[in-house]
Amino acid sequence: MKTYKYHFNKLTKNGADASRANIFHGLALLFVKVTTQKVRVYEMSYSGIKRKPLLTLYPRKIKIHYRPPQVKRMVRDFLNKNERFSIGNVEGHNLVTFTNGTKCLFYEGMMITYGGYLVGTIPKRVKKNTDVAINALKKRKNAMNRLYYHRKKATERFEAAAVFEKRRNGSKSLIHVDVSQLPLTDVFKLQNVSYRRHLINYYGLNAILAGLESEIIDSDVINGNPYHLVSVTFPYTNIGMVEKGTYLRMVNPSTDEVHFEGVPNYDRSLLLLRRRNRWNFRETLSSPTVRAALAWRDRERVYSVPKKLT
């Protein structure tokens, strides 16, 4: 593939006014000479030529006006060969890595050399935002390492407490596991669903949920029985996401035993979508209330309080 420098020289030194470089079917770059010191580069597709230039080429530098979707094919691949310049989407951040290893968030009007080195200095606001983003990425990476460590140790504990039978094909089949040797919190660390099920069956869902951090969303008393709609935060979940579940917390009036029953989270945007498109009402609660949760459980639109038999 010809480089940007090649196209710049072709137009400014050989007398041509425009040239084209095909990237793949339906996408190309159009090079237009403005002066002998300036060439503009535009995106071309089936829908036409973009009005705003992607790049402006100068004798010793390139100005990037915006980040294109096909950034590798449209920017990186046209730089001088064997350079390490890149623009990548890292956890939602458009992070630029220059050839010398310097990093910063992408900003419109960025100047680089044909070898992928930064021209000038990074604006203060961009540098500040870059530091925040890189620190967040480091924290996430460290947290992921801790998560993988906990998952690995939980698996090791489970397999140490288990008895397996080796099959002829080399795989192993679980015969028995002494769950009493395992801590309750391993239920959130084990990724193997069949392993995790043994802990849930042993400890019971009510005991597991009762020990988690929770927040009461709504409370109600129906026929003398207290109900709470609670939001439970799950530990050891995917980093970067706070995973919560919604449960009805009820008390058995005969035994005073606490019981949890899972219901969907209340999602207002999903509720609005459901109303417009007749979305399945099972996807979300109609409101963040005990009665809405009971209506969902009973497959009703509005909860009907059962009448006491006298």
Image (cartoon, rainbow, N blue to C red):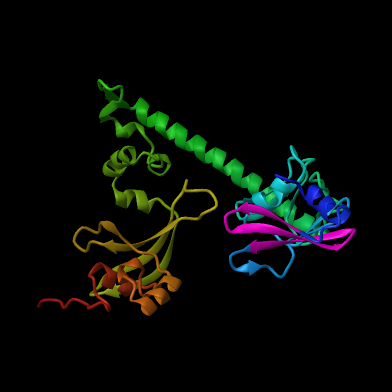
Name the residue nearer the viewer: 234 or 66.
66
Q: Which residue lies at the image location 55% right of the left edge and 52% below the top edge?
A: 240
Work out whether residue 155 or residue 11 is closer to the camera in this orientation and state it.
11
**In the figure, 284 relative to 143: above or below?**
below
Residue visible at 60% across and 46% down in the picture: 140
Left or right, residue 281 beside residue 102: left
Q: Quadrant of residue 108?
A: bottom right
Label tally: 0
Q: Let me know if residue 180 is in the magenta part.
A: no
Q: Nearer the viewer, residue 16 or 25?
A: 16
Residue 203, x across and y down, in percent = 30, 43
User: Magenta segment, which residues?
Assistant: 19-44
Q: Position of residue 147 (x, y in %)?
A: 51, 40
Location of residue 260 in the rendering, given as x and y in whole percent from the top left corner: 30, 58
Residue closest to the eye, 97 or 38: 38
| Magenta: main secondary structure | strand
User: Which image quarter is the C terminus in?
Assistant: bottom left
